[in-house]
Image (tube, helix red, strand yellow):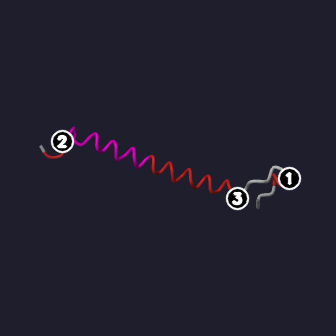
Amino acid sequence: MGIHYDYKSTRGAKKMQKQQEREERRRKRKQTTVAKQDGYTVPEDVVLTLDMITDPNK
């Protein structure tokens, strides 16, 4: 029997575990992208210039 004996009985648990891992990776990616975006915001009352938009250091 060996490897194939418990395939059907553990299939659901493995699926749930993989789904949980995927969701956790997505959350981490989302948190890092949100954190990166927060540093580059410009206040609404400031007029955007071409210099501000094209400057690679900002």
Return the residue at label 3. Answer: 39
Between 5 and 40, the residue placed more toward the observer is 40
Is residue 10 covered in magenta?
Answer: yes
Question: What secondary structure is the stretch in magenta mostly built from?
Answer: helix
Q: Judge depth for marks 2 and 1 and give the one in front.
A: 1
Question: Quick one: 51 or 21, which is closer to the camera?
Answer: 21
The residue to which callout 1 is attached is 46
Q: State the SS at label 1.
A: loop
Residues at marks 3 and 1, CA–CA distance in whole angstroms: 16 Å
* Residue under pointer 2: 4
Mark-to-mark CA distance, 3 and 2: 52 Å
Residue type of the residue flagged with mark 2: His
Q: What stretch is highlighted in magenta?
A: 5-22
Q: What residue type is labelled 3?
A: Gly
Tell us which disc is closer to us: 3 or 1: 1
| Residue at the image position 22 percent from the left and 41 percent from the top | 7
Which is more foreground, mark 3 or mark 2? 3
